[in-house]
Image (cartoon, rainbow, N blue to C red):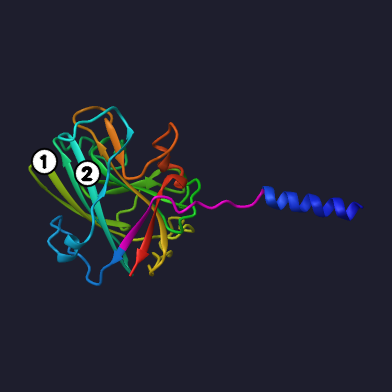
Amino acid sequence: MKWTIYLLSLVCFVSCTEIKTKKNSQVTPVSYIKDTPTLDGRPIENYWNLLEWQPIDQNWIGGPFDHNDYNGKYKMAWNEDGLYLLLEIVDDTILDQTEDPLKLWWNDDCVIVYVDEDNSGGQHRFNHNAFTYHVALDGNVVDLGVNEKPTLYNDHIISKHQTEGNTTYWEMHIKIYPSLYNDEPNIKPVILTADKRIGFAVAYADNDNSEERENLIGSVFVPGENKNAGWIDANVFGTLQLVK
């Protein structure tokens, strides 16, 4: 009788503590490219024309905005060395008011790239179960490190942008690091393969001329009241499906 009670208790414990993984929500197929883009903010390579635009239109922070003030979309591709991201951002005012890249980096106009290498979801505020890369206009890339301090990850994302009128084109190469990454230089990026699924979202922080950002507009729908949950919770990311 005691063993029966013990086994029932063990089954209950295992079922109650079962690890839950993130669902493959808002799945976006990403096509393979053999040739690496020239990162210059000028999307002149032919394969960019073959890929579909995806919208960046979910208002996570701030009030309503006019599409003359902001409009954004992106395209993606991949090869073994990482993801390649093209953005077209229409913004009538581009602001870079904080010179120190490790201070108030979220309040300047910037692109935010959310990456969860194994699409597992979960919390990532002070660990690298997932990343929230803030890509600044000067090319600096900031996220919180495992030491709980803002840290530069300029070797994780290489970016270039060009602005013509109110339209800015960004091109980025995003290296994908595993969740065991702990800010040590000996951990290498993952070699990508077909059928891999990666948690992902991209957002644009828009500040026309204020002390704080006025809007944060993202690429995925986030349920609930806290639309800006992605910086600590990878469960709200979408899912990239690498196809070849």
Q: Is residue 198 magenta?
A: no
Amino acid on which the number 1 mark rests in the picture: Asn
- Find residue 19 and report its horizontal and vertical position in percent: 60, 52
Foreground of the two, 49 or 148: 49
Left or right position of 46 against 74: left
Q: Quadrant of residue 220?
A: top left
Foreground of the two, 45 or 140: 45
Considering only order in the chain, which callout, 1 or 2, is on the residue closer to the N terminus? 2
Tell me how far mark 2 sits from mark 1, CA to CA: 12 Å
Where the C terminus falls, by quadrant? bottom left
Q: Which residues are magenta?
A: 17-30
Q: Is residue 146 above or below residue 82?
A: above
- Find residue 116 and report its horizontal and vertical position in percent: 42, 54
Q: How packed is label 1: few (under 14 Cα within 10 Å), some, or many (20 or more)?
A: some
User: Considering the numbered disc 1 on the image, is that residue within a helix, a strand or a loop?
Assistant: loop
Residue labelled with disc 1: 166
- Find residue 140 and report its horizontal and vertical position in percent: 26, 49
Left or right position of 53 against 118: left
Amino acid on which the number 2 mark rests in the picture: Gly
- Residue at the image point whose x is 15% and y is 55% from the top: 41
Q: Please identify the dominant SS of the magenta region.
A: loop
Left or right position of 36 against 175: left
Q: How packed is label 2: few (under 14 Cα within 10 Å), some, or many (20 or more)?
A: many
Residue labelled with disc 2: 72
Q: Quadrant of residue 157?
A: bottom left
Q: Foreground mark, 2 or 1?
A: 2
- Find residue 102 and report its horizontal and vertical position in percent: 32, 41
Which label was assigned to residue 126? none
